[in-house]
Amino acid sequence: MPDLSDRVVLVAGGGRGIGRGTAEKLAACGAAVGIADIDPALVEEAVASVRQKGGTAYALPGDMGSQAETMRVAGELAAKAGRIDGVVNSAMWIRYEPITEVSEETMSRMIDVGFKAPVWAAQALLKHMDPARGGVLINFSSPAAMQGYPNTAIYAAVKGAMVTLTRSLAVELGPKKVRVNAVVPGPVPTPGARAVVDEAGYELRKRKTPLGRLGREEDLANAIAFLFSDDADFITGTVLNVDGGCSLTAS
């Protein structure tokens, strides 16, 4: 388990699913975690879970799709913990629907949470990190960005944008000692994902995964903890598939 005892990490979308699992893992590695989510009740539950296990966590409810809210949340964490060393951008708002049915409201919300929020998070990290220490940004992409799936056009476009954002920021922010990487989860039946994928869909995803199982929240959390660690201090601009090999098989 990597030693992250000197890190302060903001986890956007940390109230449930992969975000919560990541917050719990980073805290178990010694990091102080700020858990941000739009649902205050989920934030309190996640913070309580971390603290019950002996970790340090701060409750930071807020809408990370808003630049003003992101800056407020980041400012609160920095005031409590002294600085921010990294951000995990795990939040996403998902709707799968035919392109003919996509509304302006749906598109705006997916872009706000899935694309704008990581941009605001980068700004927040740069404002509150210690320039001598640098920082780490972790974004989330998706197999949908690489393979074609029906009814996922907006989601896939947002996740494709995260790949280009990650690589661009890695080059731009490298001189500032900021490493920027992305992870690509395989099929992980989180509460949010189960809202748009049924059991038959997960069975299909399991069959096409070479390792023969669905992903778990801890699979992503372990990878993210590594990317935060000193062992990964020469890794930036990488898009890491944590998917059991499903991105290698035909859709």
Image (cartoon, helix red, strand yellow):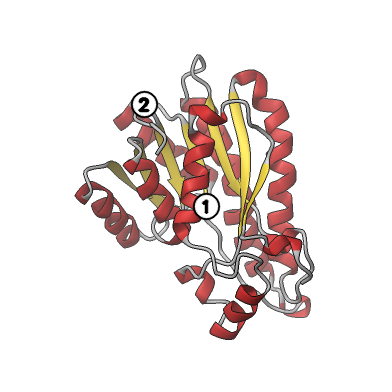
Q: Position of residue 162 (x, y in %)?
A: 68, 48
Q: Is residue 63 visible?
A: yes
Horizontally, is 69 left or right of 176 in the view? Answer: left
Secondary structure found at label 2: loop
Residue identifier under label 2: 6
Task: Between residue 48 and residue 206, name the one nearer to us.
Answer: 206
- Callout 1 amino acid: Ser
| x, y percent for residue 194 | 51, 75
In terms of depth relative to the viewer, which is nearer, 27 or 226? 226
In percent of width and height, residue 238 lies at: 68, 39
Which residue is under mark 1? 90
Q: Residues under labels 2 and 1: Cα distance?
A: 22 Å
Closest to the observer: 113 or 50? Answer: 50
Give the quarter of the image for residue 97. bottom right
Q: Residue furthest top?
A: 132
Residue 69 appears at what percent x and percent y? 46, 45
Q: Residue at x 57, y 47 (%)?
A: 117
| Other residues around mark 1 within 10 Å, as few (<14) / some (14–19) / many (≥20) | many
**Which image quarter: residue 84?**
top left
